[in-house]
Amino acid sequence: MLKLILVDDEWIILKGLETTYDWGSMGCEVAGTATSAEAALELIKEKQPDVVITDIQMQEMSGLELLEKGKRIKEDLQFIIMSAYRDFEYAHIACERGAFSYLLKPIEEEKLEQVMGELQKKISKETALQKEHENWRQLLLEENIGLSGILLQKYFKNMISSEEFSRLMGLMGYELCDTSCFAIVCAVFQTCEIYVCPVF
């Protein structure tokens, strides 16, 4: 479930936003609501949400400012901007600055479900990628001996891209270029494993 914070300086609209939609069916739980950007920033620090849905026009601090300050607190925090028709250009600027999407008021349930579904996919993909990178980082730290051979096996089996292969080899101090050569040495043991060794 994605943790969600809702922000609008009009209390009635905020309450309606919280209770009108079936957030659970969209894979979200409302972790908090705020009637000001300042209060929202405190909630972001406390709750560490995945998503903030905020009005763009608020007193004292706009949704744009909230977006910028919120991402300083949590870099991967996603923002969805709510705006009236008259704020369309403003919402467009917000998307250019990193907002995931914008929703026009009053928010249509079908459109909201579509946007949240797309956001779920984006966050899931990024989470999987982060997990993969963390696994590789642990491998680099814990399996230093013979790691180049492991990477080569994965590369030749198309389990990692050439860009990722070059990046990981670079972390171990190998600088690859287009003319880099590799020698494959096969040895037959009871386990019938294939061992690959690099030659630079």
Image: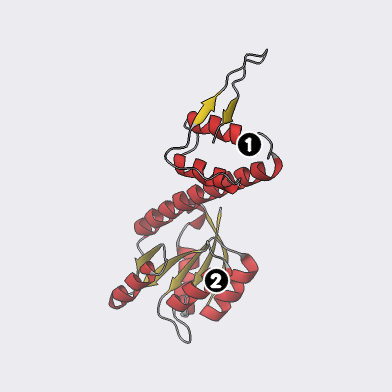
Distance from disc 2 to disc 1, alpha carbons, whole Å, reads 36 Å
The amino acid beneath tag 1 is Leu
The amino acid beneath tag 2 is Arg
Q: Nearer the viewer, residue 91 or 53?
A: 91
Task: For residue 176, say whether it is visible.
Answer: yes
Q: Quadrant of residue 145?
A: top right
Residue at (47%, 72%) from the top-left corner?
Answer: 67
Residue at (43%, 74%) from the top-left corner?
Answer: 55
Q: Quadrant of the C terminus?
A: top right
Whether pointer 2 and pointer 1 mark residues with C-beta atoms closer than 8 Å, the reply is: no
Q: Position of residue 53 (x, y in %)?
A: 46, 67
Q: Residue furthest bottom?
A: 60
Q: Is residue 52 left or right of residue 97?
A: right
Q: Position of residue 103 (x, y in %)?
A: 36, 66
Q: What's the mark number on residue 11?
A: none
Q: Is residue 110 above or below residue 12?
A: above
Q: Is residue 75 above or below residue 181?
A: below
Residue at (65%, 43%) from the top-left corner?
Answer: 140
Q: Quadrant of residue 90?
A: bottom left
Q: What's the mark number on residue 72?
A: 2
Instruction: Return the disc, 2 or 1, that comes first in the chain's sequence.
Output: 2
Q: Is residue 10 above or below residue 199?
A: below
Task: For residue 36, say whether it is visible.
Answer: no
Q: What's the mark number on residue 147?
A: 1
